[in-house]
Every structure is written in C-alpha cells, then in structure tokens.
Image (tube, rainbow, N blue to C red):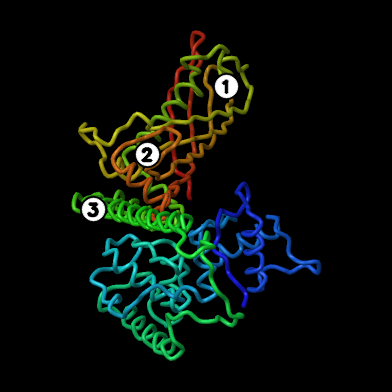
Amino acid sequence: MTVIHALQQPVGRGQPNADDDVLNIKELFAELGRLRRPDDGLTPFFDAPLEDTLRTYQKDRALMVDGKMKPGGETERNMERDFGFRPKEPPFSLAELDIAGPVANGRRGRPEDFIGVSKALGRLGLFAFDRTAAPLPFISKGLDDGIRNYQEQKGLAVDGRILPGGETIGALKQDVERTMAAEGKAGDGEPSSSGHAPRQKIPAGQPTQAGGRDMAGERRALDRSLEGMRRKAVNIRVSRAQQSMHDRADQFGRLDLPDAEAHLRHYLTAKGTPIRYSRDKARTFEPVRELEATIQHDFKRRTFQGIADKNPDPPRLLSMKDGATIKVIDDFNVSTANMKSDKKEPGFDLNAAKALGDTKMKSKGRFVATRKGNMITITGTVVHDWGDEYDFNDDKTKTSGPGAADGRTLEEAGAARPFKFSGTWRQKVEATVERRNGRLFTRDVKWTDLNE
C-alpha cells in the first residue's frame, strides 16, 4: 500500500522544503501523470519541474497560482480530493437552485443564490472553483462566462442573466438533477480509489507511541479553523461592499443620473472593457464642454497671440516676414482635477461628476500660417483626445472619497474592475490675426467639427 503523508511544512520557492514533503509531492504528481519520473528516480529537492507542475495544477483547479503547497492549504486539499480523501464536489442540493433574486453581472442578488448557481455550473464543468470549499458569494468574470457558455450550449438567450422562474434556471435544474442521478449510481460524494493504487493518508506529526499528543496535527486543525474564519470574514466584507455599490447604483438611477449609474454597473461587471464615446455623446457632459472651451481659449491666447504665463521666446507669428508661410505645432493638456462632485454651483453636472470624476483632455494642433501685410491667416486641424480611468482605488492620487474602500475590497476579490472611458474627435480651425504695434491681436477664430 502506497502511503500519502500530509505535509509538515510548506513547499515552494523560498519555503522550508523538507525532503520528505518534496519527495511525497513528486510521487503524487508522478502518479497523476503530471510529473515525469526520471530513470534514476525522483529527488527530494524542490526544482523547476516541480514548481512548473504545481503552477499548472493550481491553474487547472482554479486555485491561487503561486507554485507553493502549504499544510492544510487549498492545493493540498485538492490533491487529497484527487486521490479520493475528500468528496468530489462540495455539499449541494437542488434546493440551492431555488433562487429568489437575479444572478447576473451588475445586478444585486442573494449571496446564497450566487453560491448555488456556482456549484451547479461547476458540476456541469462550466465554472472552475476550489471544489474543497464553497464558491464565493458574488459574481465574477468566470461565473459570468460560465452562465453565458451554458446559455449558448442550451440554445437560450445569451444575456448572462439567471432570473427566478426563468428558462435558464429551469434548464439548469434539469441538467444538474440528471447529473446528480448519474453520480448517485456511482456513489457520488464518497471517497473512491480514483483509479489509483490503494492509499493510506498519514497525518503530519502522527505520534509514534500510543497515547502521544499530535501537536502538529492540532496546529494544522487550528490553522484550518483560522483559515475558515478568515475566508468567511472576507466573504462577508465582499458581500457588504457589493451590496453598498449596488445601492449606490440604484440611488443614481432614482436621482436620474443615467451615466453615473451605467458606469458604476459596468465597473461591477468586473470585465474592465473600455467604453468609447462619440464626440456628440462626450459633449453632453458639462466637464467635457468646459475642457474643450478652455483648450480653444488656450490656442487663441498662446498659439495665435503668443500670450503665456511663461514665454521667454518671442512668438513665431510675430517674427514672420511679409509673404512668409510657416508651420505651427502646439498642444495642451487640461484636467478637471480641481472639480469635486459635491459642488453645488448653478449648472453643475452631478451626473458627469459621479460618472467621470476627474477627467482629462489632450489636444494637439497642426497649423499653417501665412502673412500678407499686417494680417496673418491661420488654418489647421486640432485633435481632441479626452478620457480617463474609472477607478475607486486611485493609487496615484491616494483618493479616499465615497466608495473607495468598497471599490478596493471588490477589486481585490475580482468582483469589480477599473475601465477606461474615452473619446477622440477633430476640429478644423480658421483664424485671422493682426500684427500691430509689435503685438498680435486675434480678429476671428472659427472652429468647425470634422466628420468622425
């Protein structure tokens, strides 16, 4: 009978890597067909092949991929599961699919409903999670993909939503019930040989004398208890943060702040997909209109008239000779960093403030200037590039405004993801500047939108 020894110390890069632990892990991976057994036998050394095998195994099992195995940790638990010392699936009953709320991205639902759907899709091979523990009680990109894949396979509407009484939850119940019935005939949930040679699991630190006290085993039991408590605390914190964010989105809806609501719900999908805005849509935001007007003023004042706070060199347009034609290039970066969403000024765009936060615009101009007498004609194009990142956890500015703590919690759990929003458009510029008494005076500036 081959014996499985429970780990006594962590194994991995920078870990104790006890000889017995390393050799035992290599033996197990070799039997699983994941590690080649050399002709001269396995060595008790932690090496690159073992680290690569650990990382691949962890990735396949939807575990944290760190190339390490710890006593009582998720990687060791899954190894025990593979050899039949743990149930194939976490405890599950069809009643867990009697959902009372939506299970979908951007929708607030019950934690137990997310857990039930996760288990069901896991049994159908459509959602990967650590099978030795309950899945997380919120939606993630993996769960969203699993829902959509299931709907596509069943020929249902692929919308990533599972609703109480809907066709997706009905079909899921039937498929899982059939799967459970088939598993029941094979002894579902009971330890099995898994096709491997008979094994015996020996706990770490087992006493060699009768009546001895297994201190290492007691420590491992305490570590598992603490790990369970930590996981539960994390789940509670994530659920509360998710509920708080959905409440915030609901409030934006009630206050008729459509873009603020849409951006927050997009953030909560955890997809991170960029959002591109057309010129006309971008201009519906009051801050964008202000940025564009500021940049147009800057081009007029600095580029065309040569007026600037710091301008040690004479403006090029002023030094032009009569009949000359020159090229002029200039660009500006403007930000609404000083704008706060709690302003109460008349005309303040609360929808934009909540949807965009601080936002930036970079504009680059390319012009041709021709002087005839004292008049200078300027024509050219300006490209406006507007946008920023939607993120409640801005590490660069260390913002700690409303929602920052909840956003950080959800991002760390993979339940929310920042995304970029942006828009780009071009304008044709026609200007006339008069040269008089050693100064430049703008007579006319015309800005015309070009086709997008």
- Residue 288 numbered mark, or none: 2
Tell me the amino acid under the disc marked 3: Asp
Residue for badge 3: 247
Q: Residues within 10 Å of mark 3 (few under 14, many from 20)?
A: few
Question: From what the image shows, is residue 66 above or below residue 340?
Answer: below
Residue for point 30% across, 33% down: 340
The residue positioned 32% from the left and 72% from the top of the image is 162
Front one among 129 and 42: 42
The single residue placed furthest to the bottom in the displayed view is 185
- Callout 2 environment at 10 Å: few (<14), some (14 to 19), or many (20+)? many
Q: Amino acid at mark 2?
A: Val
Is any atom of residue 181 visible in this view? yes
Q: Nearer the viewer, residue 75 or 27?
A: 27
Residue 101 sits in which quadrant?
Answer: bottom left
Relative image position of residue 217 (x, y in whole percent)? 46, 59
Q: CA distance from mark 1 to mark 3?
A: 64 Å
Judging depth in this view, the residue of 242 and 1 nearest the camera is 1
Residue 229 pos. (x, y %): 34, 55
In the picture, measured across the screen, residue 189 lies left or right of residue 380, that is left
Q: Position of residue 300 (x, y in %)?
A: 45, 25
Compare marks 3 and 2 and give the one earlier in the sequence: 3
Residue identified by numbered label 1: 372
